Amino acid sequence: MSFRDDGAEALEWAASYLERVRELPVLAQVEPGEIRRALPESPPEAGEPFSAVLRDLDEVLLPGITHWQHPGFFAYFATTGSEPGILAELLAATLNVTQILWRASPAATELELVTMDWLAQLLGLPREWHGHIEDTASTSTLAALAAARQAFPGRVVLCSEQAHSSVEKAARLLGLAVQKIPADHEFRMRTEDLHDLEGACALVATVGTTSSTSVDPVAELAEICEREHVWLHVDAAYAGSAMVCPEFRWAWEGIERADSVVVNPHKWLFTPVDCSALWTRRPDDLHAAMTLVPEYLRTGDEDALNLSEYGPALGRRFRALKLWAVLRCYGREGLQERIREAVRLAELFEGWVREAPGWEVVAPRPFSVVCFRREGSDEENADLLERVNASGEAFLSHTALDGRYVLRLAIGNARTTEEDVRRAWDVLRREAR
Ligand SMILES: *Cc1c(COP(=O)(O)O)cnc(C)c1O
């Protein structure tokens, strides 16, 4: 078989998968080790046709796939690998550019800069900031905190007790200490105790926390950070995408005074993993923290920007291609429409929970995630979640808020309809009986 024929089959597989994914159980119903045991222990001696790979994808791997593309996926943060993004990934692998330097593929670097400028415009961020793409928010935050450590003498990172674990991990890798600030009753960082930031080099504000999507007060924190000479990094990994709609920009009012911001298009902007957008208004500090050019990479391209000098990785995937494809094929209107629909569906679900006796909404819902629980013990709620997920009809995850076990319904998959949300609610009520 030729590349063309295999390719046509792979694309056919992809298209029919997306058509039938709704009928598959969302959460993989397998035991640990089951898939591994079904795979050959050793590699083949002679090469096999590509069709054998496709066959095993169906027969061996698919039962062990949790379907993130399923419209009934409501766990963690629901995401979408959109069609333009999928096709662009194929093309990026075809070009197989490794963006170590500008000259290693000028178009890759320059498209990345243009795409990040477009995204800044779409989200209402200052256009003069430096922006580039990292793999994940974990890496973006690591790079931002390395820049903060470069810029300021302190060795402590402040964040709310609701901040993502990636902040603590980055601090640990950088040899920085973490100080967690208590959150208020709506899970926002309390600023009352933030008078003396002695010893701190950075403060991380979260816009859309991972547990409840709560929003730290960015403008107020920016004021404090400026006064105290502390780097303000804003983690908007999930909720940053919502800023494509002006009505959500209240959530990061004052963002232009942040020193760095991370938004993950692979979370809520229809871009396949991995794609994390990092901006900073202090590119010189980021550059100073990250640049280290060995002799074999020294070139005379003085006007050229090497994006590898702004992040941890030398070799960089051509991620801008998929983000560019998504921004072009959706357009501002298409992105806004889908973000607004996700929020509308979450609001609808929140209303059903509020009105149902024996159910309770347990956190404010600024975006598309509803935190709720069924009356009863933590254990009863955990059992309920297990039963719902075992049904294969919907997949939800949980968190803890105020020391209680809480169920979370996250909407973000572009294929999710009102009927899918209704079905999840029916399954929840059925299993609660
Ligand atoms: C998901 C998330 C992260 C981590 O994102 P990765 O890209 O998986 O590293 C960080 N912060 C917040 C607020 C998140 O929701």
Image: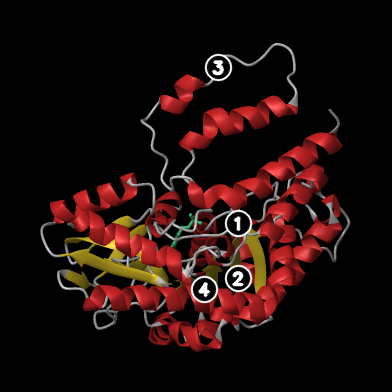
The answer to whether 365 is drawn above or below residue 250 in the figure is: above
Dot 4 amino acid type:
Gly
Do we see residue 197 in this rendering?
A: no
Dot 2 amino acid type:
Trp
Q: In the structure shown, which secondary structural element does the residue marked by tag 4 occupy?
A: helix
The label on residue 240 is: 4
- Separation of marks 2 and 3 at Cα, in angstroms: 44 Å
The residue at which mark 3 appears reads as 40
Q: Of circles 2 and 1, which is in front? A: 1
Query: Along the horizontal axis of the image, is 412 left or right of 119?
Result: left
Q: In the structure shown, which secondary structural element does the residue marked by tag 3 occupy?
A: loop
The mark nearer the N terminus, 2 or 1, is 1
The residue at which mark 2 appears reads as 279
- Separation of marks 4 and 2 at Cα, in angstroms: 12 Å
The answer to whether 148 is drawn above or below residue 7 in the figure is: below
Dot 3 amino acid type:
Pro
The residue at which mark 1 appears reads as 81
Do we see residue 430 in this rendering?
A: yes
- Separation of marks 3 and 1 at Cα, in angstroms: 29 Å
State yes or no: discs 1 and 4 in contact (Cβ < 8 Å). Answer: no
x and y, in percent, of residue 37 in the image: 45, 20
The answer to whether 48 is drawn above or below residue 117 in the figure is: above
Q: Residue at 69%, 63% (x, y): give it.
A: 323
Dot 1 amino acid type:
Gly
